Image (cartoon, rainbow, N blue to C red):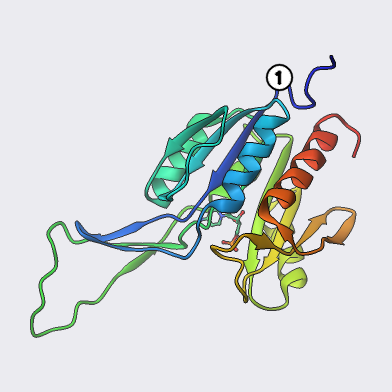
């Protein structure tokens, strides 16, 4: 039988939210479930890739054949991603927190004055990978938008120096849900896919990645 399409390839995937501690018992987070990223990791592994999945805190089983590294914060995710390179492709699906908190070393107590959270910017993992010396041949980012989805995603592709952006409209029930409606934005233009189960989006994207790495697209 022919070798699977992604045999011999290493693909890095990030997925899930990050948690940014406020104090030892509290954190900032977002509604990402990790489902789309885990589905992509599974599809890529099924096509024969060696997949490193850097996962934020999610309640999902590790897909068969995938090497999983669990992290909590954006800064931990950035370090795990750098450590996992080189890769033939990187698919950055994680909903990385834009900010971390100047965290209190002890649990904050209720008192007279309301606490004020001081935020600091997190590293942009996707932009760092796309500009780095170890840049994978194919860098794919995601864009979760609630308005002017394609316009924002086209701008994001250029700003982050990604090859492709998968844009989804998260104004409805996409985050945490089972289906996704995406646009694939490449240097050649914009493709709008039907609303599909996340597993089907994952399989289609994995096939496209296999095409790109084999030079067919
Ligand atoms: O800028 P924005 O968060 O909308 O970009 C989304 C894309 O960038 C996703 O691919 C996400 O995984 C990635 N990203 C990242 N590190 C960040 C912020 C976003 O890798 N700090």
Q: Position of residue 95 (x, y in %)?
A: 52, 58
Secondary structure at numbered mark 1: loop
Quadrant into which the C terminus falls: top right
**Horizontal arrangement in the rendering, residue 139 relative to residue 41 (left or right):** right
Toward the top, the furthest residue is 1
Q: Position of residue 49 (x, y in %)?
A: 68, 27
Instruction: Establish if 12 lies above or below 21.
Output: above
Q: Where is residue 2 in the image (x, y as percent from the top left)?
A: 85, 17
Residue identifier under label 1: 8
**Horizontal arrangement in the rendering, residue 200 relative to residue 130 (left or right):** right
User: Which residue appears at 47% of the width and 62% of the height?
Assistant: 98
The quarter holding residue 29 reads: bottom left
User: Which residue appears at 68% of the width and 35% of the height?
Assistant: 44
Asked if residue 162 can be seen in this view, the reply is no
Quadrant into which the N terminus falls: top right
User: Which residue appears at 72% of the width and 56% of the height?
Assistant: 166
Instruction: Establish if 183 lies above or below 35.
Output: below
Count residues near mark 1 (Cα–Cα under 10 Å), then give few for <14, some for 14-19, many for 20+: few
User: Which residue appears at 50% of the width and 37% of the height?
Assistant: 62
Name the quarter showing ligand 1.
Answer: bottom right
């Amino acid at each position: 039988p022919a070798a699977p399409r992604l045999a011999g390839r290493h693909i890095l995937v990030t997925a899930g939210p990050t948690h940014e501690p406020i104090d030892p018992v509290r954190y900032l987070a977002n509604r990402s479930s990790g489902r789309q990223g885990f589905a992509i990791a599974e599809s890529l592994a099924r096509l024969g890739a060696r997949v490193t999945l850097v996962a934020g805190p999610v309640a999902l089983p590790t897909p068969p054949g995938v090497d999983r590294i669990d992290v909590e914060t954006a800064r931990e995710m950035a370090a795990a991603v750098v450590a996992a390179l080189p890769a033939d492709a990187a698919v950055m699906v994680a909903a990385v927190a834009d900010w971390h908190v100047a965290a209190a070393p002890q649990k904050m107590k209720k008192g007279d004055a309301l606490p004020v959270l001081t935020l600091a910017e997190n590293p942009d993992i996707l932009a760092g990978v796309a500009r780095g010396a170890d840049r994978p041949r194919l860098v794919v980012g995601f864009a979760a938008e609630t308005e002017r989805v394609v316009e924002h995603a086209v701008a994001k592709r250029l700003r982050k120096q990604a090859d492709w952006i998968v844009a989804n409209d998260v104004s409805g029930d996409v985050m945490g849900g089972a289906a996704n409606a995406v646009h694939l934005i490449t240097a050649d233009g914009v493709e709008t896919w039907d609303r599909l189960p996340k597993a089907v989006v994952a399989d289609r994207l994995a096939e496209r990645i296999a095409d790109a790495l084999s030079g067919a697209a």
